[in-house]
Amino acid sequence: MTMTLSKGEKTRLKIIQTALDLFHSKGINATSVDEILEKSQTGKSQFYYYFKSKDDLIHNVVLNFSDMLKNRQLPVKYDIESWDDLNLWFRFFINGQKAMNCDRGCPMATIGYELTKAHELIRQDINLIFETTIHSLSKFFHGLKVKGELDKQADPQGMAEFCFLIVQGGLIVSKIQKNTISFEHSVSQAMAYLKTFQKKN
């Protein structure tokens, strides 16, 4: 069931979505409130009606992203149920980089990189987003182990964290190198390594 947003809710969401795009492309420090207002075609009175400050907006951007992830509104593969699904999950990030000409990294990591000690709550919420992603991967590997399809020494949590870090590193490196060659090689090697834990018949 699709909920109809009020005019005010639409304005608030427009500011949040515009801010996310600018934070993702430029970072939070290089993005001013005035730039967000200009690009979202909103005014300062509207901004300060919905947000106490720029930091409050940043936090709301993170919370909105978290809600989208929980409600499955992001175009990423959520349920990893096979090795093919895992490969598709990796490919999603590679293809995303290609589509953006390798100009950006992970939106939450981009925001998180510039946080200070004063942003502890925002850091925690970004970490929860990361943990949600890792959990979905760990669930897949744990399921394989329960079914007896992985060796006893396989560590589902460690394997999930490995996948997550391959993606995060790949996003950063491809942005710097302006191509996905190393990212794709790393994913191929990661898949080959992970499959060494498959139980041999």
Image: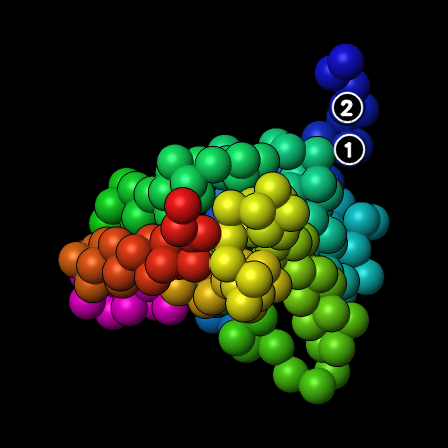
Does residue 53 appear to the left or right of 137 in the view shown? right
Q: Tell me which corner region of the image, top left, top right, bottom left or bottom right, holds residue 174.
A: bottom left
Highlighted magenta segment, given as a residue range: 169-178
For mark 1, give the secondary structure: helix
What is the three-letter code of the residue carrying label 1? Glu
Which residue is at a point 21% across and 59% down the rendered structure image? 185
Q: Name the residue: 58% across, 36% down.
A: 79
Q: Quadrant of residue 84?
A: top left
Q: Quadrant of residue 156?
A: bottom right
SS under mark 2: loop
Q: What predominant SS class does the magenta segment belong to?
A: helix
Marking on residue 9: 1
Q: Quarter of the image for the C terminus: give it.
A: top left
Residue 151, which numbered label?
none
Per the image, the residue denoted by label 2 is 5
Of 167 and 14, the residue lying toward us? 167
